[in-house]
Image: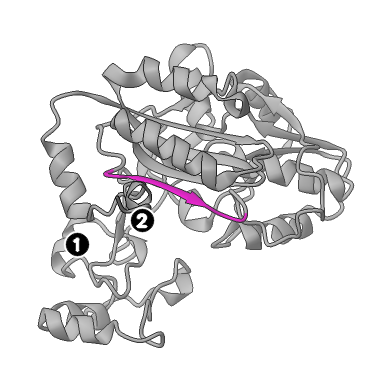
Amino acid sequence: MDPNSSKKNMFNKLSKEQGLKLLAQEDFKRKTVSFYRYVIINSTSDLRDELYESWKNLGVLGRIYLAHEGVNAQLSIPEHNWDEFVNIVHGNILFTDMPFKIAVEDDGHSFFKLTIKVRKQIVADGLEIDEYDVTNVGKHLDAKAWNDALENGAIVVDMRNHYESEIGKFKGAICPDVETFKEELPEVKEMLKGKEDDQILLYCTGGIRCEKTSAYLKDYGFSDVSQLHGGIIDYARQLNNNETLSNNFEGKNFVFDERRGERISDDVISSCHQCGEPFDTHVNCRNANCNLLFLQCDNCKEKYENCCSVDCIDIINLPSEKQKELRKGTDNKKMYYSHKRVNLKLKNDD
């Protein structure tokens, strides 16, 4: 028997097309959830294999990151296996009483395969592990306390990337124009300079980035830092469960799965990057060598062949072998890729 055979079964190598085809054949409903915890994991590789084996057997799909500092997971679970999944997670001493954030909009197609990766950090901040105490976090506010703080004039900061906040944000939020969390920490510290004694409110998708940010800001002398408990995801859940709560979020909550977003309010606060019409659903450029994430309405999607630029339109109309040739080599790989607005090459109609 091949000693590596069991290890080979610990990775899902389905293509996106294969995974989506299998999803379409399912005759049951799924539940999309996310969770995270900062907790010391001594053997990430062993835990990775343990989780993969048990979750694969339950038909769980999704993307999970494990690191010495903790876990960050976004998953899709068959509803008929939900109770067993919860028992497995809570049965692990590292994840006892783990709270789950359940999606507010769910078509069952959020993920198409199971991927569990071991990383240096569950949220990359570019800092040394001992540079600040990640456990010294700020106060957690539920939706009501959050709304009250907003009404009392607290400073609110969006701890997500620009392409997330462009389709949805809290009213009056400071939204840093950054692509990565690594860029955002020093940017936010600089933006809040002189506000060390003010009440600072932080929010993100599910709370994980705010957890680090609150500890980071406290380490730099900010005395009153709070974060939205459970992030935008749980804020929406609390709104749905309590009609007396006012909704201070405008637009969509960007999510990192096939859905791309969950609508929190009817407001459309962004525009198609090509024609300027109100629109708030992201797509990826059809050119595989670009894959730019941008806003493209249905009309422009048809008009520009699901591409972001003239260059990309030219490339997707080349023979497939020629397209593959262009992707070879480190100089060509992802030659156009960037989330930055300034790099978006739009087609001109002149």
Horizontal and vertical percent position of residue 335: 38, 81
Identify residue for label 2.
Answer: 271
**Dot 2 lies on which element?**
loop
Up the image or down, 333 lies above or below 18; here it is below
Asked whether residue 172 is in view, the answer is no
Q: Which residues are magenta?
A: 112-120
Q: Mark 2: which amino acid?
A: Ser
Horizontal and vertical percent position of residue 110: 31, 39
For the residues labelled 2 and 1, the Cα–Cα distance comes to 14 Å
Looking at the image, residue 20 sits to the left or right of residue 226; the answer is left
Up the image or down, 76 lies above or below 274; here it is above
Identify residue for label 1.
Answer: 301
In this rendered view, identify the residue nearer to me: 20 or 309.
Answer: 20
Looking at the image, residue 73 sits to the left or right of residue 15; the answer is right
In this rendered view, identify the residue nearer to me: 197 or 44.
Answer: 44
Q: Are marks 2 and 1 in contact (CB under 8 Å)?
A: no
**Mark closest to the chain's N terminus, 2 or 1:** 2
Say which of marks 2 and 1 sits in front. Answer: 1
Horizontal and vertical percent position of residue 83: 38, 15
Quadrant in which the C terminus appears: bottom left
User: Residue at horizontal 61%, vertical 48%?
Assistant: 159
User: Residue at horizontal 18%, vertical 23%?
Assistant: 28
In this rendered view, identify the residue nearer to me: 257 or 177.
Answer: 257
